[in-house]
């Protein structure tokens, strides 16, 4: 055992040759297998299912989480607001609901679409300091570049990407995060150029791939 993770759990994985069939797998074993392949110069053979969430304040600032230095990968780097592995048998929406509470101490409304978000946000906007309003945007599989012990490894992720808004205070879990940073999207993109090593590749990927959807979302708040 490599000892990257302190707590074992059964997560949802996929063979890359058949993304239609979810496969239960111990999280430690998944990473040990895929890191061993990377060290041998091989490409990923499996992906792990994860949720990736970007929360914004009503005035358009992105809430970035600084990852704890005790994390197995991307330790000490600024990342998305929150993310997490999807346990086998759980839905992505359920995982987001659990992760917002566990990582940020924030309850959330997790909606299936932008239409449901707009309807719910319009009705309950007065509670924006009490709960986050989040909706599902897209799902894809890609090779995420992550830093393990100062070495970059490609780990395949099947991600479920969400956007949301929250106006209240957060209390990040000390085990998960070392703090929070709030930045406008344009300022963050400038920092990517001058301080690239401070930010995860995932964060850059999602801001670039979903730039138009993010801009439209922020403008609608």
Image (spheres, rainbow, N blue to C red):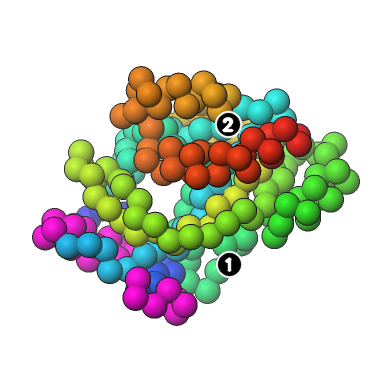
Quadrant in which the C terminus appears = top right
The x and y percentages for residue 15 are 35, 74
User: In the picture shown, does residue 170 fall above or below 96?
Assistant: above
Q: Is residue 63 left or right of residue 43?
A: right
Q: Is residue 185 magenta?
A: no
Q: Which residue lies under the disc numbered 2?
A: 62
Q: Nearer the viewer, mark 1 or mark 2?
A: 2
Residue under the point 48% across and 60% down: 140
User: In the picture shown, does residue 122 fall above or below 60?
Assistant: below
User: In the picture shown, does residue 48 fall above or below 116?
Assistant: below
Determine the image quadrant of residue 29: bottom left
Q: Is residue 94 left or right of residue 46?
A: right
Q: Which residue lies under the disc numbered 1?
A: 91
Determine the image quadrant of residue 36: bottom left
Q: Label 2: few (<14), some or many (≥20) within 10 Å?
A: many
Q: Report the span colored magenta.
A: 16-41
Q: Label 1: few (<14), some or many (≥20) within 10 Å?
A: few
Q: Is residue 1 visible?
A: no
Element at label 1: loop
Element at label 2: strand
Depth check: give the residue in front, 214 or 70: 214
Q: Is residue 26 magenta?
A: yes
The x and y percentages for residue 70 are 31, 40
- Circle nearer the N terminus (1, 2): 2
Q: Which mark is residue 72?
A: none
User: In the picture shown, does residue 46 fall above or below 40?
Assistant: below
Quadrant in which the N terminus appears = bottom left
Residue under the point 55% across and 44% down: 210
Q: CA distance from mark 1 to mark 2?
A: 25 Å
């Amino acid at each position: 055992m490599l000892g990257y993770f302190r707590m074992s759990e059964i997560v949802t994985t996929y063979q890359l040759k058949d993304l239609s069939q979810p496969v239960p797998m111990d999280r430690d074993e998944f990473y040990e297998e895929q890191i061993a392949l990377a060290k041998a110069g091989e490409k990923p053979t499996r992906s792990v299912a994860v949720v990736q969430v970007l929360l914004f304040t009503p005035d358009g600032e992105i809430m970035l989480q600084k990852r704890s230095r005790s994390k197995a990968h991307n330790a000490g780097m600024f990342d998305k607001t929150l993310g997490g592995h999807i346990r086998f048998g759980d839905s992505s929406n359920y995982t987001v609901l659990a992760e917002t509470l566990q990582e940020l101490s924030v309850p959330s409304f997790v909606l299936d679409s932008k239409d449901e978000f707009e309807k719910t946000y319009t009705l309950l906007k007065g509670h924006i300091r009490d709960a986050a309003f989040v909706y599902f945007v897209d799902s894809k599989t890609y090779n995420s570049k992550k830093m393990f012990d100062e070495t970059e490894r490609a780990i395949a992720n099947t991600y479920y990407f969400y956007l949301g808004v929250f106006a209240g205070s957060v209390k990040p879990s000390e085990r998960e995060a070392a703090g929070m940073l709030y930045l406008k999207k344009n300022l963050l993109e400038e920092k990517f150029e001058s301080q690239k090593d401070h930010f995860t590749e995932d964060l850059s990927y999602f801001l670039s791939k979903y730039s138009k959807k993010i801009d439209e979302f922020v403008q609608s708040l």
